Each structure stands twice: as C-alpha cells, then as structure tokens.
Amino acid sequence: MRFAFRALPAAGGGTLTPRPVVGIALEGLTDAPMECLLDTGALRTRMSAELAPLAGIELTGTVTEELYVGGLKTVGALARVNLTVTDGADEFSWDAPVWFCDPWPHPFGLAGLEGFLHYFLVTIRAYDGYLDIEPRPDTEGT
Amino acid sequence: MPTMTVSGHQYDLDALRVQKALQGALPEPIQEHFVVINGRRWPPKQVLALVTGLDRADFTTHQARRALTRLGFTAGRSAGPRRQHPGAATATAPSPPAAAGPPARPQPLVEDLRPFIGLWVAVRDDEVLVAAPSPKEVVAWLAQHRQRAQSMFRVPDSEQAINGAAPQ
C-alpha cells in the first residue's frame, strides 16, 4: 500500500515540508482514519484520547504512563485495539497496543514501533514523496 | 442592502448577514454547485435555506446560486474527484527515476487546506470533506452525511506543531 507524504500550508504562507503519514483507522471509527506521523524514533503508537470515546474504546482502569512529547507533559492510557490501513484498493487489519494521550495538541497521531512498525515492512521514499507499507508475512492480521 | 424575492417571500440580504447565518454550521457535501463563503465551499441551497429559513424544496439550486452571487460570493462547479498524488495513485505504479533533486509536483490540497489552519479536517481524494474545531464534530459530520474519509488530522498552525509531535 502506498501513501503520499502530507503537504501542508504554512500559516505565514508557502508550504511546510511534506511529512510521511499513514491513515490508521480505529475499530469503530473506520470512516475517519487518524492520520499518523510515521515515527521511527517512537516506541509507542499514540493518538489523542479524544478519539477513544468516539470509537467506543474504554480507557477507565487501563494502564497509564506519563510522558513528554515535544516538551509537553501528557498522560497515555493503553488499549489494545483493532487497527486498519487501506489505500482504497488493499486493506489490512491487525490488533495492536495504542496509547491514547490527554492532552494531545499535536496535529497527527504517532505511528511508532509498537502498534505499527512491528507489523509492516516500510519503505520510505522521501525523495519521491511517498512511502510503501507491506504487512509482514508472519504478522497476524487480515 | 439588496432586497430579493425567493419563493414569493422578500428578504433584505447582504453578505454579512449570510456569513452570520452560517456561524456554527458545517458545509454539507458538495454535489455539483458551490459558493465560496469565508474560504469554504457551501452548497448554495444549504446557504439560502439557513439564511431565509425556507425549506430547500421551495427554490432551486440555480435560484440560490444566483441570489448568492448577486451578494458578491464566488460560485463554482465541482469537477468531481481530483487527481490523486502520483505517489498514491496506484500501489503498483513504477517508481519515477531518480533525478537531480526532488521533482516539482503540484499539491492541490495544500491551498485548499489553508483556510482551515488550526481546524480538524477530513480529506478524501485531495478534497477537504469537512473542517471543524474538534474531531468529534468531524466524525459526526461524516456519519450524518454517510461519507468516508481517507484520513483526519488537524491542520497545524506552525511548523513547530509538527516537529513537536516527535519525541525530542
């Protein structure tokens, strides 16, 4: 599956450098896949806690951790959820740990090692402005 | 302030009143015709119904479009789904050969996103489906209008907003 880098407008005019992103849909929220920044330096996969109730994901009583992202302190709550990626033609779903963070003022989620990179072979072609992902043959998913 | 007759009723309308009537509303999906108000595309009939309180069955799209263009709003016609990013078009497309520097590539969505800096958006096929202050409103809009987005994100208001997302 291929995903174009996301180009964005700069507030002061012009455009920001396009970033490698993947739209990851939470089970229960398949009509609105959350765009996640591909982050090879991140251990976890993280999204805004605002999304959890929209997808019917219960976070009460789950494991939490405090962390700093971009200098901002936040609290992540762990949930194991079903995730889906699709390019419109192919689709792949898998179960993975996702940390739902509050506050999360960032524009994207983060697709890190746990939850995303461990499940795919990823080829980043920054020069050409896109990335390819292929589910690992031995990955449990559909 | 121009006086207009819509479906047998007279209204005193101006651009400001129209803009005010749209506050708090989200544009519905564009079928074909649209008018641009505050940097966003709106179905003409939705706008005129919000402004006048009339039922949409009481007037046609062309009447609504004509009334709104008289007030100075730009009108247009959707060309349908736009060209996808060459990298996203097909997963099996051969890769472009390496050359001296990244190829210049049009980014049609970038300018369409500009009015929505700071807002959450849902996009599909290089088109902004909806923009709203929260993901909850975006998700509700998609469900209400039975639309499926390719992705949802917040248009950052600064480069730091993206850089800051990666652990330092």
Image: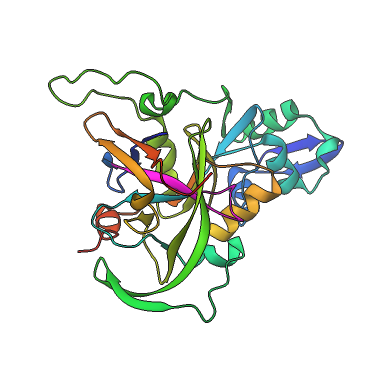
Q: Residue at x 30, y 24 (%)?
A: B105
Q: Is residue B68 visible?
A: yes
Q: Quadrant of the C terminus of chain A?
A: top right
Q: Is residue B141 left or right of residue B82?
A: right
Corner quadrant of residue A99: bottom left
Image coordinates of residue A60 in percent, x first then y, are 54, 79
Q: Against A126, is B49 above or below?
A: below
Residue segment shown in magenta: A19-33
Inspect the magenta stretch and tell me whether residue A27 lies in it: yes
Inspect the magenta stretch and tell me whether residue B91 lies in it: no
Q: Residue at x 33, y 38 (%)?
A: A5
Image coordinates of residue A92 in percent, x first then y, are 50, 42
Q: Quadrant of the N terminus of chain A?
A: top left
Image coordinates of residue A97 in percent, x first then y, are 44, 63
Q: Residue at x 81, y 33 (%)?
A: B59
Q: Is residue A110 left or right of residue A53?
A: left
Corner quadrant of residue B145: top right
**Foreground pick, B24 / B65:** B24
Q: Against B124, is A35 above or below?
A: below
**Foreground pick, B134 / A94:** A94
